[in-house]
Image (cartoon, rainbow, N blue to C red):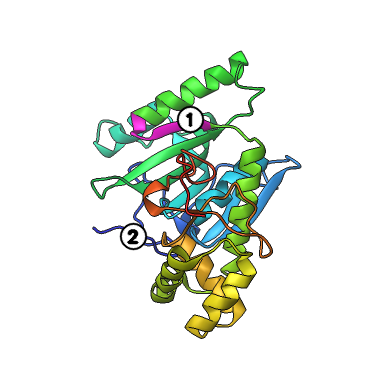
Amino acid sequence: MAYELRFPAIYLEPDPLGVPYGPDYVPVVRAGVESSYTTDYLFTSRKNGRTCDCLGMGEKWMAWLLEISPFVLAYRCQYPLLLQAGRDAADEFVCGIRSQPPKLRRRDIMSLDIVVTGINKHDRLDYTVLSHKTEQDLGKPKVKRRIARERTEADIAGYRYIVFSRDRLLDECGKSARQISLWGGKLDFNSASSVSRAIAEIFYREYDCRPLDAFMRKVGRRLDLSLDQTYEYFSAAVNLGFIYVNLSYPVRTEFPVCLIQPNEAVPPWISYCGTVNYSLVA
């Protein structure tokens, strides 16, 4: 099967652990319901086709980076990972070794902050666990044990495991990503490829570091689009991977944007801003 960016990614079959995508996905913890954190955050994800449950500001800003990243087909917050013992018991029932289905308890399921679905170099789906831990907590014995357990269970499942921490850079990049996403409005990204690609070609060929709004007006006149439409297609161009923006620079209408060469772009779990090479276009 050929995998590609589609909005939402509800065409994806359940992952190797049987966890579905889209409206069928049920997080272990729902923000503002089972969780009582004052920093809980909910938003409707265009990419996932459902609400995104973030428990804290670190998860919130990472989710916005994932939302616009073309390296990400889908992502699921508060992911229910059935622990190895529970998976073994379920397999025994399926294989007929057990006559009765196992009785799974809440403690048999580990909640992982975010699990990202992407495509590897062999055009196959791969999975990355993003675990948010604050910098001040990383040295605590309890947190170290939790990280070790998460890593072990992720390895058994065949998932990559990465720990990230909220900092000023994540906040700034997350805000820029959110702004780009909101510019997309109600545009259907699945049918926006042609115009979005045209906008990207103009940006990479002609962008001269002027304030974004001024250049958008120029692009709109060239393509016979209103200013609002131009911003919508710009958002689609970023989401579809035609334009890469350094998110560490505030993305606002009155500021210039800093473009990244496509071959220098990396996923947000490698670099929040979108690149590790600072030989940038603008």
Per the image, label 1 sits on a secondary structure element best described as helix
Q: Nearer the viewer, residue 57 or 226?
A: 226
Horizontally, residue 190 falls left or right of residue 228, namely left
The magenta-colored residue range is: 156-163
User: For the view shown, which residue lies furthest in the right direction?
Assistant: 38
Query: In the rendering, at what x and y percent does residue 86 appear?
Result: 40, 30
> For residue 255, which quarter of the picture?
bottom right
Is the N terminus in the top left, top right, bottom left or bottom right quadrant? bottom left
- For label 1, the residue is 108
- Where residue 223 appears, as percent x and y from the top left, is 48, 82
| Residue at screen point 63% across, 16% down | 140
The amino acid pointed to by label 2 is Glu
Is any part of residue 70 visible from this angle?
Answer: yes
Residue shown at 35%/33% (left/top)?
A: 157
Callout 1 amino acid: Asp
Whether residue 259 appears in magenta in the rendering, the answer is no
Q: Which numbered circle lies on residue 4? A: 2
Mark closer to the chain start, 1 or 2: 2
Of 94 and 82, nearer the camera is: 82
Q: Secondary structure at mark 2?
A: loop
